[in-house]
Amino acid sequence: MKQEFLKFTGYNGSPFTARLTRRGGRELAVLLPGLNYSTDMPLLSYSHMLMAEREADVLALDFAYNRKPKFRIAPQDERLAWIKEDGRIALDAALQFGPYARLTVVGKSLGSISMGWGLPDAAPENTRLAWLTPSLVGTGLPARIAASQYPSFCLIGTRDPACTPEMMDRLRGMENATLSIIEGADHGFTRPEGVAASIRAVGEAMEQMQGWLTATD
C-alpha cells in the first residue's frame, strides 16, 4: 500500500487537497466529503474500509469549504457553482491515476453535488455511485440521480429533513437506484438515543452498502 498527498487548483484558483491510497487494484474509489463531514468521519471512513476490502485504490478529497471564509459568505448560486466545478476537477484528475476497470464514487451530503455534476463523460462503463445523505432539496440533484445511467445507492435517515414521503417515493421510482432508509438517523447519521445507537445506524448503513457493492460487482 502506498499513500500520496495531492494538491489541486479548484474554483477561482482556490486550492483543495486529497489523499490517494494505492493498493494496486483495478478499481478506483473516490470519496467526496460534506461541508462539515470529512472523509475521516464514520460513513466515509467505513466506506474507505469497504473499498479497501476489495483492494481498490481510494482517493479521499478534502475541499475544506468549512474553512474557507469566501465560500461561507458566497451567495447560494456561487456556492453551488464552486462545488460543481471542484467536483469536475477532482473527478477528471482521478481518471488520470491509472487504467481502472471500475470507478466507485461516494459522496456525502454536499459531496453528492460534486458527484452529480462532476462525473466526466469519459467515466468507465463499470461506474457506480453511492449517494450518502444526498443534498436533495433546492439543488436539482434528484433529477441528476434519476438521469444517471450508472447503478446508484441512496442512503438517508428518517430524521434527515430531505426524508419526506414524496422524496422517498421519487427515489424508489428511479430505475437504477437502490434506496436504503435507516430509522432514526439524522443528516449527520446520529441517533438521539446516543452514541451506541448512532454506531448501530452507521453499521446498518454499511451492511446495506456492502450488499449493494456485492450485487453490483
Image (spheres, helix red, strand yellow):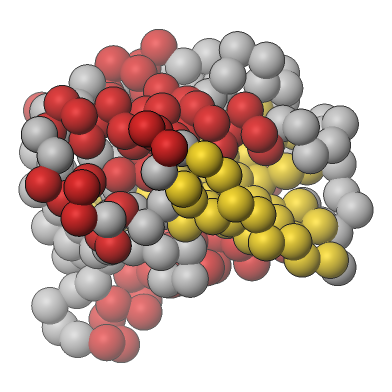
Residue 209 at x, y = what percent? Answer: 52, 52
x, y (%) of residue 57?
A: 76, 52
- Viewer-proximal residue, 170 or 56? 56
> In this orientation, does residue 170 appear?
no
Q: Position of residue 74 (x, y in %)?
A: 14, 39
The residue located at (54%, 67%) in the rendering is 46
Is 40 placed left or right of 132 in the picture? right
Above/below status of 109 relative to 90? below
The answer to whether residue 126 is seen in the rendering is: yes
So how many labels did they put on this image? 0
Q: Residue furthest right?
A: 24
Please give the name of the residue rendered at 47% of the width and 57% of the height, measured from the top-left corner. 62
In the image, 81 versus 45, the foreground residue is: 81
The quadrant of the rendering that contains the N terminus is bottom right
- Above-or-below relation of 39 to 8: below
Q: Is residue 63 left or right of residue 159?
A: right
Q: In this image, 59 relative to 106: left or right?
A: right
Q: Quadrant of residue 172?
A: top left
> Which residue is pictured at 77% across the width and 52% down the height?
56
Which image quadrant: the C terminus?
top right
Spot occupied by residue 166 in the image (x, y as percentages of width and height): 10, 28
* Residue at the image point whose x is 36% and y is 76% from the top: 200
Drawn side of residue 187 relative to residue 99, left or right? left
Q: Quadrant of residue 163?
A: top left
State the residue in front, 210 or 126. Answer: 126
Q: Is residue 65 above or below residue 176?
A: below
